[in-house]
Image (cartoon, rainbow, N blue to C red):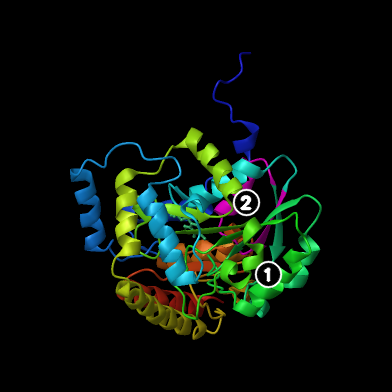
Amino acid sequence: MPQDPFRRATRIAAVELSEIIQVSEAAAALKRAGRDVISLGTGEPDFPTPPHVVAAAHEAALRGETTYTPTAGTPALRTAIAAACERENGYRPEPAEVIVSTGAKQVIFNAFFATLDAGDEVILAAPYWTSYPDMVAVCGGTSVVVPTDAATGFKLTPDALAAAITGRTRWVLLNSPGNPSGAVYAPAELEALAEVLRGAPHVGIIADEIYQHICYVPFASFRTVAPDLAGRMLIVNGVSKSYAMTGWRIGWGIGPRRLIEAMAAAQGQATSGASSVGQAAALAAISGDQQLLAERNDDFRDRRDMVQSALNATGLIRCASAEGAFYLFPDCTATFGKTAPDGAVIDCDADFTAALLSAEGVALVPGRAFGLPGHFRLSYAYARASLAEACTRIARFCQSLT
Ligand code: PMP
């Protein structure tokens, strides 16, 4: 028998379609069948890209900025990122310590791809963004998942971090504000983690700060709190969430030159430099008027308050406070053992989200997709009317359980 030419390589075999995408597809199928579905499953801002940003991209294209760019990003954007970093976080990297990639996702992928060998470990706190363990797997590494809970605000504690570090640890990944928990690490919490990491000089640190500007408490960058660890830290950020630019695909990493060069080598063989017009747009976003960030932040905070109190009022869903990003990660374990009107018994978070979708047409993502069952993720980056209607339906669903 000839072998299948399209058999999956080992490195990709374990990677399944993300459960977030599965949920949006299930919701889309119900919609096509004529059901009125509210999907709060995906995580992107519902604001438009600011008009001056769109105009800057248009002008760049008309000026002929439509050719290949340097692999690690245009000099103008790398310099503007350094300046924005100084303005916002109080340190100024050299442009050579900055790499621009096709989204923050590619920054993290590059870091893993450029550094992980078989058996190398990456410490992830659950709940985590679903792509982290998949990227580690694709790059041949091993995820070491440390569960957290609402009692610690879904944050990694110094003891749990210390216990997870082994001789094979290459990276610990921290995400603040966090997807899906909305957790934000306070400076003292980062400092306590930094203290553990000072005792583990073989461990690199990835701080994914993509939600920096969607934060309802003062934001602290890990690098600002622990500048002495900058030599083994990669800061990840970008325009996708802050400036409502998910489709433009521009993110960046800030780290030691040796790491940035290795990541650029990886990127050079995968995608080359990021989109030229995307980089022109990102330059306008981070260099222009920043007032909109505060306005949008206030708007997200109002929506969080509204949804959080409505969910807690159901009595069955416990929704801990989230201090940033645009997600809530409530506990639904009080519904376990109950029966939905159609006879479905709820035994786990995925049963809860499936029964809710079927009964009320509200799509949410089960916590198991983020490595922490017993919860679900709700994105509140949707119109207030949809959020209010979704909350009404969730409350009705909870009341209908017997
Ligand atoms: N990190 C986290 C925590 C995210 O939630 C996302 C987007 N879902 C990304 C990184 C990737 O962002 P980008 O669109 O810039 O690739």
The spot of residue 326 in percent (x, y) is: 44, 70
The relative height of residue 70 versus residue 124 in the rendered view (above or below) is above
The relative height of residue 324 versus residue 240 in the rendered view (above or below) is below
The relative height of residue 292 versus residue 110 in the rendered view (above or below) is below
- Label at residue 133: 2
Q: Amino acid at mark 2?
A: Pro
Q: Give the side of residue 245 with respect to residue 56, left or right.
A: right
Can residue 362 be seen here? The reply is: no
The relative height of residue 357 versus residue 96 in the rendered view (above or below) is below
Q: Secondary structure at mark 1?
A: loop
Q: Badge 1: how crowded within 10 Å, few (<14), some, or many (20+)?
A: many
Instruction: Identify the residue shown where x is 34% and y is 56%.
Output: 282
Q: Amino acid at mark 1?
A: Leu
Indicate the quadrant containing the C terminus: top left, top right, bottom left or bottom right. bottom right
Is 244 within the magenta?
no
Instruction: Identify the residue shown where x is 55% and y is 52%.
Output: 131
Q: Which residue is mark 1?
A: 156
In this picture, which residue range is highlighted in magenta?
121-141
Nearest the camera: 342 or 246?
A: 246
Nearest the camera: 280 or 309?
A: 280
Q: Give the side of residue 57 with respect to residue 300, left or right.
A: left
Nearest the camera: 33 or 156?
A: 156
Q: Secondary structure at mark 2?
A: helix
Q: In terms of image quadrants, where is residue 110?
A: top right
Q: In terms of image quadrants, where is residue 191?
A: bottom right
Indicate the quadrant containing the N terminus: top left, top right, bottom left or bottom right. top right
Instruction: Identify the residue shown where x is 58% and y is 27%.
Output: 7
Is 138 within the magenta?
yes
Nearer-N-terminus badge (1/2): 2
The spot of residue 68 in percent (x, y) is: 35, 36
